[in-house]
Image: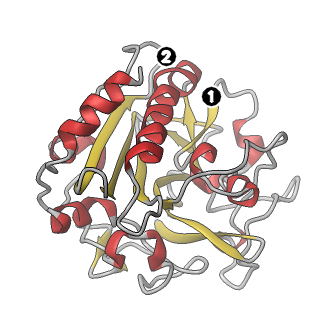
Amino acid sequence: MLAALLLLLSIVPTGSKVVNSMSQCAEFLLNETPPNVPGILEGGNIQDQNQYEPICQTFRGIRRFVTLYDTKNKIPVFSASRYIGTNSKRPKKAIWKIEPQLEDIHGNENMRKDVKGKTYNNQAVNSDYTNQGFDRGHLFPSSYASTDDDKKSTFTLTNIVPQNGPFNKGRWNKMESCIKCVLDEYCINNNNIKEGFLVIGAQPGNNIISNKINIPSMLWSAFCCYSHSEKRWLASAHWGQNIWDGETYLQTKTLAELHSQPQVIGSLQPIRAAPGDDIILRATWSLR
């Protein structure tokens, strides 16, 4: 089962900055093992380096989480992190940042605020979202980050997609809260340490804003962890259409069901359901 979970929950590229190799930032990957994503990530290498860039999200000199960024669609493919709990609140004032090395590989590896009036060719900037009718929707959410600086690091446009407001603030937010409760309650490992692994992604759609940023048709989220209390690996997945109206809650699914949705994550190696999925189904339902 662990091998099966690895196929999904280690689909993130790594590096201390924008890089081509998978050899760094392995601490954000379950068992430090990347899978193959045909046409995108194979043998630990990005296949189209003109479009997809692996970013180890660095803030104030510390690597916080990892993202695969699509420079053509100007949105992340997915972001991933190791969950260890949180001990701080959402920053009172969000400062939206960009990744300097997407424009200049020799630039500073730390994310920073964009320069007003400057043209950026390979990424979205804050003004691109102004008066466009969409939220700046996190993939890796601030609420999952541990420290105050970790939370601030999630406010980078390379971790953001255009998200319909009712979807972002409604059913997607409810799902994030439910999964966080499960992580806090069940994901305590044999060393009595809270630990879980998350991968959260977006599927490009057919429309754009600001003449360049793709509006995802769907967002998806998956996690797994080892639970000492249950003596097994636990996992679940969610996805939903990025539309104004929709169901009140996103249904909890297994990893196998996520894999069966080609419009969600494309072609991955086969994934089978985890024995712990039934526990997560019951837990998330009871938290609604």
Residue 78 percent location from the top left of the image: 44, 55
The span from disc 2 to disc 1 (Cα, nearest Å) is 10 Å
Q: Nearer the viewer, residue 73 or 69?
A: 69
Q: Is residue 37 above or below residue 206?
A: below
Please tell me how crowded label 2 is: few (under 14), some (14-19), or many (20+) other residues with Cα within 10 Å. Answer: few
Q: Is residue 48 above or below residue 219?
A: below
Q: Residue at x 28, y 38 (%)?
A: 280
Q: Which residue is mark 1?
A: 134
Residue 50 percent location from the top left of the image: 47, 72
Q: Residue at x 15, y 46 (%)?
A: 256
- Which quadrant would residue 226 be assigned to in this image? bottom left
Q: Residue furthest right?
A: 116
Q: Which residue is mark 2?
A: 244
> Disc 2 or 1, which lies upstream in sequence?
1
Please tell me how crowded label 1 is: few (under 14), some (14-19), or many (20+) other residues with Cα within 10 Å. Answer: some
Q: Is residue 97 left or right of residue 44?
A: right
Q: Is residue 269 left or right of residue 81?
A: left
Q: Are marks 2 and 1 in contact (CB under 8 Å)?
A: no
Q: Amino acid at mark 2?
A: Trp
Specify the quadrant that holds the C terminus: top left
Q: Amino acid at mark 1?
A: Phe
- The number of discs equals 2
Q: Nearer the viewer, residue 27 or 45?
A: 27
Asked whether residue 231 appears in the rendered view, the answer is yes
Secondary structure state at the residue bearing disc 2: loop
Residue 211 percent location from the top left of the image: 61, 40
Q: Residue at x 46, y 22 (%)?
A: 171
Q: Is residue 225 left or right of residue 122?
A: left
Secondary structure state at the residue bearing disc 1: loop
